[in-house]
Amino acid sequence: LPKVKSSAIKFGIGDVLQHTEFGWRGVVCGWSEECEEDDAWLRRNSALDKKDQPLYHMVCNDGKMRYGSQLAHDRVEGPLQLLHSVPARKYEFATEEIERLFHTFDHDEGAYVPNAHLARRFP
């Protein structure tokens, strides 16, 4: 079922975000109105104060999938550039995920164009 995007969701599917403290970047491939993880996860990630905030699933330039708070990210311009220091298997994973989830990067919109399934799930 498609998720309903409220005004609380600041970023869209395909947006490239940068973590304000740690600097890694990621492409948004999902979002939730509030944290879907339990309190143990929130404590491990120093995110108890972000429990009721929108969070985003992202394919990141360090080859990881991340789930990050809206409060800790800014939208940035340009396509995701994977880090050269990323191990080959993580580089391949991130590249394959981006190719699987998105058609292309739209330079006019400044975001990746989601595939049909992702576009239906997160309109």
Image (cartoon, rainbow, N blue to C red):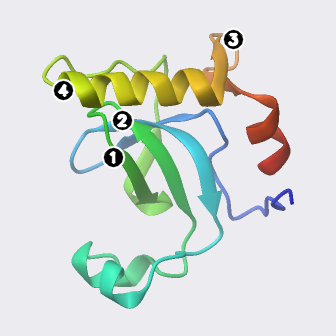
User: Which residue is located at x 30 percent, y 34 percent?
Assistant: 63
List the residue tagged with mark 2. 25
List the residue tagged with mark 4. 86
Q: Earlier in the sequence, mark 3 or mark 2?
A: 2
Instruction: State yes or no: discs 2 and 1 in contact (Cβ < 8 Å).
Output: yes
Q: Earlier in the sequence, mark 1 or mark 3?
A: 1
Q: In the rendered view, does 91 fall on the left or right side of 4?
A: left
Q: In the rendered view, does 20 fall on the left or right side of 1?
A: left
Q: Position of residue 84 (x, y in %)?
A: 18, 16
Q: Which residue is the extreme one toward the left?
A: 85
List the residue tagged with mark 3. 108
Q: Amino acid at mark 3?
A: Asp
Q: In the rendered view, does 15 fall on the left or right side of 16?
A: right
List the residue tagged with mark 1. 19
Q: Secondary structure at mark 2?
A: strand
Q: Position of residue 101 (x, y in %)?
A: 63, 31
Mark 2 → mark 4, Cα distance in angstroms: 13 Å
Q: Amino acid at mark 4?
A: Val
Tell me, for residue 89, which label it has, or none.
none
User: Which residue is located at x 34 percent, y 80 percent?
Assistant: 42
Estimate how packed mark 4 is, as few (under 14), some (14 to 19) or many (20 or more) residues with alpha carbons within 10 Å.
some
Q: Is residue 101 above or below residue 56?
A: above
User: Which residue is located at x 67 percent, y 43 percent?
Assistant: 12
Q: Amino acid at mark 2?
A: Arg
